Amino acid sequence: MVLILSPSMMCAKFSYLSSEVDSLNKANIDIYHMDVMDGRYVPNFALGPEDISTVRKNTNKKLDVHLMIENPRKYVKFFSDLGADIIYFCPDAEQQSARTIDDIHAQGKKAGIAVNTGTSFETVKELLPEVDYVLVMTVHPGFASQPFQESVIPKLRKFAEEKEKYGYILGIDGAVSRERIKALHKLGVDNFVLGTSALFGKEQSYKEIISDIRKEN
């Protein structure tokens, strides 16, 4: 089963962002995960266009943007033009989610939905035939360093059971420790967004950590 490791760049050292990207490139990560927050959909701000541009200029690897913003459909082309390969949005922030998915695909990008802790499988089921990625939030959106929400496990299991039927890549975001990766990869999760629980702020180098995670799984 595929294992995709996606560093959450909200946790990187922004004073040395180009250097951080270089180190992560050498560590052989898979996808750069860029959280975008507008202070309205979630009560916080994160990652502006200049941050996304800097990462894009310094890597040939895939880059995703997770739009935790109101009216995400209005900004699909903007973030596509910045170089995003995958665009996630939260269906509860958009009145016409199917059209948002169509707009992302029209830009030649992969479309993903981010499923918040309070959003059920049934709520987004009708969108699943159209999306390429599903990202299940395992913390409440908007802030780093939160505890893992055990209550999402039954829902995550359901998404794992249905992924072959619908053809999406399943990921999780929030408090993703190495122990969680090992357990949830076996459950059927493909893509792991890595923050301070597993990757950033550690004594080991990024290359050592990523190598160890791959060996463990």
Image: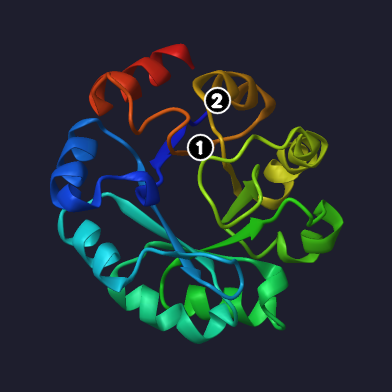
Residue 74 showing in the rendered view: yes
Task: Tell me what residue is drawn at x 52 percent, y 26 percent.
Answer: 177
* Percent x, y of residue 61: 27, 49
Task: Tell me what residue is drawn at x 59 percent, y 73 percent.
Answer: 101
Up/down of 95 relative to 42, above or below: below
Tag 1's secondary structure? strand
Residue 59 showing in the rendered view: no
Disc 1 designates what residue?
Answer: 192
Q: Along the polypeptide, which appears first: circle 1 or circle 2?
A: 2
Task: Tell me what residue is drawn at x 59 percent, y 79 percent.
Answer: 70
- How many callouts does the rendering have? 2
Depth order, front residue of 24/150 = 150
Outermost residue toward the bottom in this view: 74
Outermost residue toward the right in this view: 122
Up/down of 125 relative to 81, above or below: above
* Percent x, y of residue 37: 49, 67
Up/down of 104 relative to 51, above or below: below
Q: Are marks 1 and 2 in contact (CB under 8 Å)?
A: yes
Is residue 199 rendered to the left or right of residue 58?
Answer: right
Outermost residue toward the front in this view: 43
Q: How is the image coloured?
A: rainbow
